Amino acid sequence: MSANFVHLEQIKNVNREALYRNIKKKKSFLCIGLDTDIAKIPQHLLEHPDPIYEFNTAIINATHDLCVAYKPNIAFYEALGVSGWLSLEKTMSDIPDGVFTIADAKRGDIGNTSSKYAHAFFDVMDFDSITLSPYMGKDSVSPYLEYQDKWVIILALTSNQGAMDFQLMQDATDNKRLFEKVLERSQEWGSPDNMMYVVGATQASMIGDIRKIVPNHFFLVPGVGAQGGDLNEVAKYGLNDHCGLLVNSSRGIIYASSGEDFAEAAREEALKLQKEMERILGEAKLI
Amino acid sequence: MSANFVHLEQIKNVNREALYRNIKKKKSFLCIGLDTDIAKIPQHLLEHPDPIYEFNTAIINATHDLCVAYKPNIAFYEALGVSGWLSLEKTMSDIPDGVFTIADAKRGDIGNTSSKYAHAFFDVMDFDSITLSPYMGKDSVSPYLEYQDKWVIILALTSNQGAMDFQLMQDATDNKRLFEKVLERSQEWGSPDNMMYVVGATQASMIGDIRKIVPNHFFLVPGVGAQGGDLNEVAKYGLNDHCGLLVNSSRGIIYASSGEDFAEAAREEALKLQKEMERILGEAKLI
């Protein structure tokens, strides 16, 4: 497929300036994780033919003015097989144009295979971005970068316990840690206009070290709850002149209530975070 | 879901002894990669309602007596969206019981998400195994190991150019390389009965180093063509007392012909590799 063809298809995608404009307009850098689990959604939705979609569309309708991005974790949809893919496709069609979409897929494979994943998430699903694991190196990432106005979001320092197993390993030649190697090496693959990094919020103080290495890139920061504490730490270390942060909350928002008021409860939690973010953006003179 | 329930559901799965028995019975340690690309399959198949499935079922019928495993790379199916998942589900139902199935998915995510991928590939699709990236560490792997008689296949040293970017990084404390750290650390997560490693064939001499670290585990070795050369090198360094090797060939077999004789041509290429493997197993006194 030619780059032209891709470009024409994806004219409405969100580039870096458009993302920053949305952040200023909505006074928010909130990303809502659509980790929609059939076992956790309100039971009354199970009467619907597609409960996953019913849940997602209600969450999106209740929150899209408060967030700048949605991040479905693909595992929750693949776990349902074909019906999960159908729910995901329908969900994507409900996300308003201009809201950044992240396929949280954490893929990573050789070149010809990566091209297939890129087609699946960028052409078939029309996501703006996809999360990738860096373990297999450059040719597992570069096929995604051939798409105009599409993004890769590379795992750097994750927020889970297992992050300690390998990501902090220090290089014998320069004592740099694996996640720092990933940040530095990947600079040669893309730019702040098509590459972001996953930086776990449980590592708030390390976000400062990471910001020094990549001053201009956006970070996708998972693991921030409804309480402002983490968020202030993340902003303190991570903000740049384009905000440079997409802070994700999943369960804290979408499962705020297990009753019929789940969408309103989700909006309330999203609103708390948006208000915190508005204050932070104001104090940073970004709005 | 309880381990018992899983066990009862998956009673026919292939454990280590069963895999070794199949290798001896078929005189083969061949894995055939079903990287089925709609753009590469014979054009006459496009008349069928499900060309991907038609291609796969013909390849399986023509080769299942010559190989001990099939490895669909999930990217090729996801690239087709919902119809790809349907083709994959139908393909899985055509693979004879006892033939080891590998979901080449290279997943890797946090615990609760990994559980969803495990459900997708082990319960919904009933694969025997899945390939995983180690970047996120233990909790991105352990949920898969809770399944009885299911396997994880962890990326150690891959065969692509990008493998050089991070996998060879040396640790400052003991000079061990990242892929060696992955091999050693992951020993604490599973055993030779539920864990294998991806070891690229382009690194044949290094397979010896890896075999010293993990003497009993099976290796999934991609990148071996129809010519015996690589195969002899891989066997020289990688064989153990249970064979310990699953050598994969994808394009060299499934795209041997683009005509109506594609299945027969695939069988001929598979047969060449099986004969080489029979000689190798004989010389090693394993059959």
Image: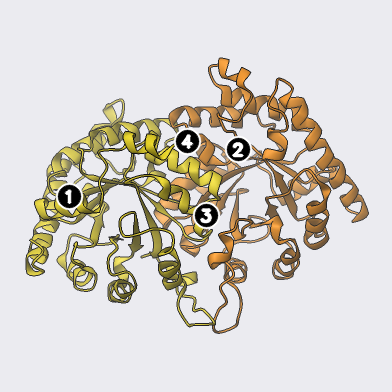
Chain colours: A yellow, B orange
Chain ID at mark 2: B
Chain ID at mark 1: A
Q: Residues within 10 Å of mark 3 (few under 14, many from 20)?
A: many
- Are the residues tagged 2 and 3 within 8 Å (C-beta)? no
* Residue carrying label 2: B35
Above or below — where is B131 with respect to A212?
above
- Residue A161: quarter of image: bottom left
Residue found at x 57% / y 45%: B104
* Residue carrying label 3: A139
The amino acid at mark 2 is Asp
The amino acid at mark 4 is Ala
* Residue carrying label 1: A67
Q: Residues within 10 Å of mark 4 (few under 14, many from 20)?
A: many
- Are the residues tagged 1 and 2 within 8 Å (C-beta)? no
Q: Which of marks 3 and 4 is in front?
A: 3
The amino acid at mark 3 is Asp
The amino acid at mark 1 is Cys
Nearer-N-terminus badge (4/2): 2
Q: Which of marks 1 and 3 is in front?
A: 3
- Are the residues tagged 1 and 3 within 8 Å (C-beta)? no
* Residue carrying label 4: B79
The answer, for residue A251, to whether it is visible in the render is yes
Foreground of the two, A77 or B175: B175
The reply to whether label 4 and label 2 mark residues of one chain is yes
Q: Is mark 3 on a helix, strand or loop?
A: helix
The reply to whether label 1 and label 3 mark residues of one chain is yes
Above or below — where is B23 with respect to A276?
above
